[in-house]
Amino acid sequence: MAGRQAKTLTTAQISTVLTHLASTRHGVRDRVMFLLSVKAGFRAKEIAMVEWSMVLTATGEVGDVIHLEDKATKRASGRSIPLNRELRAALVDLHARGIRGADCPVIFSERGVGMTANTVVAWFTRLYDRLGFQGCSSHSGRRTFVTNAARKVGQAGGSLRDVQQLAGHRSLAMTARYIEFDSDSQRRLVNLI
């Protein structure tokens, strides 16, 4: 897939993935992995490196924000991401199944150890291949998150700078490269002018 951007996921594809993951051997963990990508915009490295200490409050409960530390991000672009309700519920479910400590990874392998970024990439590749989603990769959820956030940021009273911050990009130009265009939206926009 070198030289091409990962395809964004449609609402129907997201639903298909979530339905499929409900039947997998590690369905609770798998759901969190997928939602970290599509509902928080995490890169494969960030999914692999997020620890419970970045998710839990001082009282040991799943909070409302993930405090992604510099060590878990690309180019030390640590940031705080408010938790989407669906992602938070999945994290609560995973947390209820037991963890060993706050410094433990949220996403773990079958052997109970943290995954590497490459393992996360391979997991997404297998997932999308199994479902027949051509052109999708571990970055598809991230591109979907950024595109959806850009389309809805005005409704939330924000700007593209907010999307840039959530994505952990250093420039708006990089954020803009992630956003998928929509000719129907362009038509509606022009008719509003």
Image (cartoon, rainbow, N blue to C red):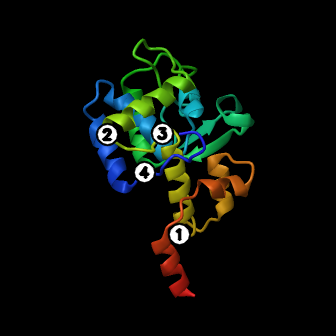
Label 4 crowd (10 A; few <14 / some 14-19 / many >=20):
many
Which sits earlier in the primary sequence, circle 3 or circle 4? Answer: 4
Mark carried by residue 137: 3
Which sits earlier in the primary sequence, circle 1 or circle 2? Answer: 2
Between 42 and 136, the one lying in front of the other is 136
Label 2 belongs to which residue? Answer: 131
Residue 110 visible to the viewer: yes
User: In the image, what residue type sits under mark 3?
Assistant: Ser
Judged left or right of residue 72, residue 8 is: left
User: Label 1 vs label 2: CA separation?
Assistant: 33 Å
User: In the image, what residue type sits under mark 1?
Assistant: Gln
Label 4 belongs to which residue? Answer: 9
Secondary structure of residue under mark 4: loop
Q: Residue shown at 52%/46% (left/top)?
A: 6
Which sits earlier in the primary sequence, circle 4 or circle 2? Answer: 4
Secondary structure of residue under mark 3: loop
Secondary structure of residue under mark 1: loop
User: Label 3 vs label 4: CA separation?
Assistant: 10 Å
